[in-house]
Image: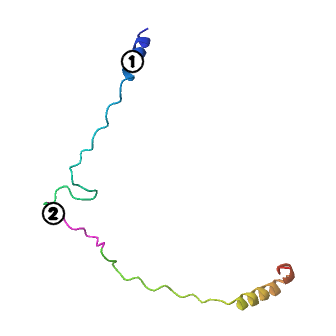
Amino acid sequence: MRFVKKFEKFLTEGAGPAPAPAKPKTRPGTKPGEKTTPGRRQRPSPIRRDRPAVEPAPKAKLPTASEDDVVKRFVNLMEEQGEDIKKYVKK
């Protein structure tokens, strides 16, 4: 019986308006990432982020093969393995 009374009490109290959401506790004028106390200095970071530590080396240039070189190599490999090239050629 006491559970029924608690349930009825819950239903009557829950029908009222919802409470207003709480306001954030930030000061006016502060932005994300901004220091809250501008007068206090922090120790500088040992990691320098303004420029990289070393200059990156240029990328290696790879040799490029022409279509003729690819076809010649394919034909040579097929002849070495003893396979027929005609089954790989588009009809």
The foreground one among 91 and 17 is 17
Q: Which residue is mark 2?
A: 41
Quadrant in which residue 89 is drawn: bottom right
Q: Are marks 1 and 2 in contact (CB under 8 Å)?
A: no
Bounds of the magenta segment: 40-49
Mark carried by residue 12:
1
Q: Is residue 14 above or below residue 24?
A: above
Amino acid type at circle 1 is Thr
- Residue 77 in the image, given as x and y percentages of width and height: 77, 85
Q: Residue at x 24, y 59 (%)?
A: 34
- Residue 22 in the image, given as x and y percentages of width and height: 29, 38
Mark 2: give few (<14), some (14-19) or many (20+) Cα within 10 Å: few
Q: CA distance from mark 1 to mark 2?
A: 56 Å
Quadrant in which residue 91 is drawn: bottom right
46 falls in the magenta region: yes
SS at badge 2: loop
Q: Residue furthest top?
A: 1
Q: Is residue 50 above or below residue 29?
A: below
Q: Residue at x 27, y 41 (%)?
A: 23
Mark carried by residue 35:
none
